[in-house]
Amino acid sequence: MKNFQNHVPIIQAPMAGGITTPELVAAVSNTGAIGSFGFAYSSAGKIDSDLCEVRKLTDKSINANFFVFTEMDVPPDKDCKIAIEILEGLPLKAVIPGSSLSAPFFLSLEHQLEPIWKHKPEMLTFHFGLPPKHILQKAQSLGMSVGITATSLEEAEAIQNHGADFVVAQGVEAGGHRGTFSADDKGDKKLSTFELLKVLKGECLLPIVCAGGIMSGEDIVTHLSEGAAAVQMGTSFLCCNEAGTNPIHKKYILEERARETVYTKGFSGRWAQSIQNEFTSLMENEYVLPFPMQYTLSSSLRKHAVKTGNGEYQSLWAGTEFKKARALPAAKLISELMSEMGSYKRKQGDKTK
């Protein structure tokens, strides 16, 4: 694929919610890797502002990522009341405004993309399914390469048939939201990144970008050697100096390493991987509204937790290998990863002599 040629084979994952600042994206791209914005919840004005700012910092390739939201029926009032009462009953007291459940629950993708057509980032990617075909075709006509997340062979085949340029193969190790086309986990085989790569490489004709659990130069080489065109790394960049990750989130990644990660629907209504905390434990078997209604409903609780510095009620998105994260400037992190890649390749070469 043209936009991987002459690049460091690393895409910094597009993490929504303010983590992927213009400074982080530019710092990554200036190394020859590809920095990414997570624009899922961003207004068109914010997207335009971030893209203007990043172009002051780099002229290298960047990626813009969006969620493919689907329309939903609002659950009956009694179900909404149950979801509200569950959140209000948690030990961390926050006002849960029922009025927040009025539609629309997500931004118009068409409107969000208006600044994309203006700024023309080199890459455009999507999570949670297939974007309308006219959007894909317009992006390609403007010179962008389009990638879509797959968690299975069936999804990858649908992406290929839709006309995308590459597949982001997301393994179960990945932090944040599971990128399945379906909002539930029915039929999700929960393949590891490496297992998914092996399944796809014999069947999918598109370049494959591997995402999930990749934290070191050895991890990168292992996936590239098996046929990946590049890797996508998110958790690795959460503690970079330039990242907009809130301080408590960074603290849990760097200091709470006795904890494990869990998948939860409690924050958003969709399965997402987070560092285990009090909220994930208390919400394990509780009723939640569909995505993104639950995300809207829990917003005030999450904001209160951030404001009060309470990490036990924040969405601490992270992959299974978060304990290997490093607190470094992005350029230094990529330099270390490239050095590790070289060392591992030399070691492997020595073994074959």
Image (tube, rainbow, N blue to C red):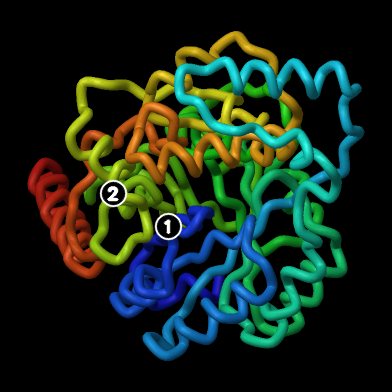
Residue drawn at 73 percent across, 53 percent down:
160
Determine whether 99 is above or below 108 in the image.
above
Please count the marks in the image: 2
Q: Position of residue 213 (x, y in %)?
A: 37, 37
**Camera-nearest residue between 326 and 103:** 103
Query: Which residue type does callout 2 highlight?
Result: Pro
Q: Quadrant of residue 272?
A: top right
Residue beneath the point at 32% across and 54% down: 237
- Please give the name of the residue rendered at 60% of the width and 25% of the height, measured from the top-left corner: 265
Marker disc for residue 19: 1
Q: Position of residue 258 (x, y in %)?
A: 21, 21
| Label whose residue precedes the other's in the sequence (1 or 2) | 1
Name above or below for residue 296 compared with residue 239: above
Q: In terms of depth relative to the viewer, which is nearer, 238 or 249?
A: 249
Quadrant location, the N terminus = bottom right
310 or 237, which is in the foreground?
Answer: 310
Q: Position of residue 118 (x, y in %)?
A: 69, 87
- Residue at 58% from the left image edge and 68% from the top image edge: 64
Q: Secondary structure at mark 2?
A: helix
Residue 267 rendering spot, x and y as whole percentages: 57, 31
**Looking at numbered disc 1 in the image, what kind of residue is underneath it?**
Ile
Left or right: 232 in relation to 131: left
Q: CA distance from mark 1 to mark 2?
A: 11 Å
- Determine whether the residue tagged by mark 1 lies in a helix, strand or loop: loop
Which disc is residue 264 wearing? none
| Mark number, residue 247 | 2
Which of labels 1 and 2 is toward the front? Answer: 2
* Quarter-of-image position of residue 19: bottom left
Report crowding for label 2: few under 14, some 14 to 19, many 20 or more residues within 10 A (C-alpha): few
Task: Judge whether residue 281 can be spotted in this image.
Answer: yes
Relative side of 50 to 253, left or right: right
